[in-house]
């Protein structure tokens, strides 16, 4: 099998505007089958629009390529039938039970062996013993499981998740990601937009979207190592005041307090050393550390997209 045959998504030159606002700008993306790709970026950067363009929910202004082996401009209906889409907002019927919701989804998709598929989804997502509970009475974590069951009931080859764990507790988030990885191991391709750095690190690779452009792509390790960012961590008294003062210093891209420590990042090691030099005396201690993914994305946001594209 050639490399091209394994690509679930291979699209180039994707563009979309709404009126005078250009929301997606020349995005090209290739995703292999069974991979989990995370999209990060500030609100309004174009993450959700990109997801919807790829699965046929929106029509692009321009672009070419294939999704699930099909022309993504001319085979939109076929692509949608092979795609699951889970939105941030719970959109199932709250006055119906878990099982009734899934049965309704199965009827909409005209799925064969409907009862067996619903039973399988209930078991797979740990919903079996709650099948008679009203959806509206579920907690955020259980609503999330139900939404995931509904989005994958028709056994899609591609799954799009738009901020899927917003407002969900850490335990439920971890369980959710365990389910996603189990599905990816079975060949499901997943695209997910998220604001959580720990979730981004659980993706096989990450894309950062800014002003409609995909400006960085790679694994978390590749993005951090390729950023050129330098980070120092210091511990000592009066962290709040020192953080505010460091934010104003030349060469400091970000300064953030973490408990009794402050993390300072920038692109110029010598400039950073000059910035922290006044705070190296007395009880304050500094050590150079590996930048976090959050440090890198603060750096990305602080510079114009055209500056990154020129590199």
Image (tube, rainbow, N blue to C red):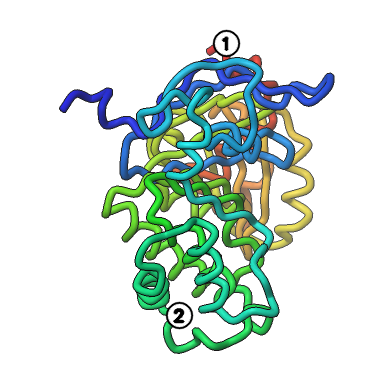
Answer whether labels 2 and 1 touch (C-beta < 8 Å). Answer: no
Residue at screen point 27% across, 54% down: 186
Residue at screen point 35% across, 49% down: 188
- Tell me the SS state at disc 1: loop
Label 2 or label 1, whichever lies nearer to me, is 2
Residue 254 lies, in percent from the top left, at 67, 40
Label 2 sits on residue: 127
Q: Which mark is residue 310?
A: 1
**Which callout, 2 or 1, points at the residue further toward the start of the chain?**
2
- Tell me the SS state at disc 2: loop
Residue nearest the observer in this picture, 80 or 304: 80
Residue 261 lies, in percent from the top left, at 60, 58
Circle 2 crowding by C-alpha within 10 Å: few under 14, some 14–19, many from 20? many
Residue nearest the observer in this picture, 165 or 287: 165
Q: Is residue 305 above or below residue 111?
A: above
Q: Is residue 85 above or below residue 123?
A: above
Residue at screen point 78% across, 36% down: 248
Residue at screen point 37% across, 46% down: 157
Residue nearest the observer in this picture, 284 or 138: 138
Residue 301 lies, in percent from the top left, at 67, 33
Quadrant in which the N terminus appears: top left
Q: Is residue 210 above or below residue 105?
A: above
Whole-Å distance between the Cαs marked 2 and 1? Answer: 50 Å
């Amino acid at each position: 099998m050639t490399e091209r045959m394994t690509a679930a998504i291979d699209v180039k030159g994707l563009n979309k505007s709404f009126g005078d606002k250009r929301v997606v700008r020349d995005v090209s993306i290739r995703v292999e089958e069974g991979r989990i790709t995370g999209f990060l970026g500030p609100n309004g950067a174009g993450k959700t629009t990109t997801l919807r363009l790829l699965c046929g929910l929106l029509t692009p202004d321009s672009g070419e390529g294939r999704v699930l082996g099909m022309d993504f401009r001319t085979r939109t209906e076929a692509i949608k039938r092979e795609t699951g889409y889970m939105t941030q907002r719970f959109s199932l019927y709250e006055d119906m039970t878990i099982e009734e919701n899934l049965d309704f989804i199965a009827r909409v998709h005209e799925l064969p062996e409907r009862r067996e598929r619903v039973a399988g989804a209930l078991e797979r997502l740990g919903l079996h013993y709650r099948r008679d509970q009203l959806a509206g009475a579920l907690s955020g974590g259980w609503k999330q499981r139900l939404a995931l069951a509904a989005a994958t009931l028709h056994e899609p080859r591609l799954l799009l998740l738009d901020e899927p764990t917003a407002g969900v507790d850490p335990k439920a988030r971890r369980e959710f990601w365990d389910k996603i990885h189990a599905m990816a191991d079975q060949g499901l391709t997943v695209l997910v937009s998220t604001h959580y750095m720990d979730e981004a690190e659980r993706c096989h690779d990450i894309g950062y979207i800014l002003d409609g452009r995909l400006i960085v792509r790679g694994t978390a390790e590749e993005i951090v190592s390729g950023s050129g960012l330098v980070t120092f961590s210091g511990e000592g008294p009066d962290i709040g005041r020192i953080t505010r003062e460091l934010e104003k210093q030349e060469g400091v891209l970000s300064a953030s307090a973490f408990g009794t420590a402050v993390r300072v990042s920038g692109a110029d090691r010598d400039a950073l050393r000059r910035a922290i030099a006044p705070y190296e005396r007395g009880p304050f201690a500094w050590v150079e550390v590996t930048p976090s993914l959050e440090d890198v994305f603060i750096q990305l946001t602080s510079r114009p997209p055209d500056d990154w594209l020129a590199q």
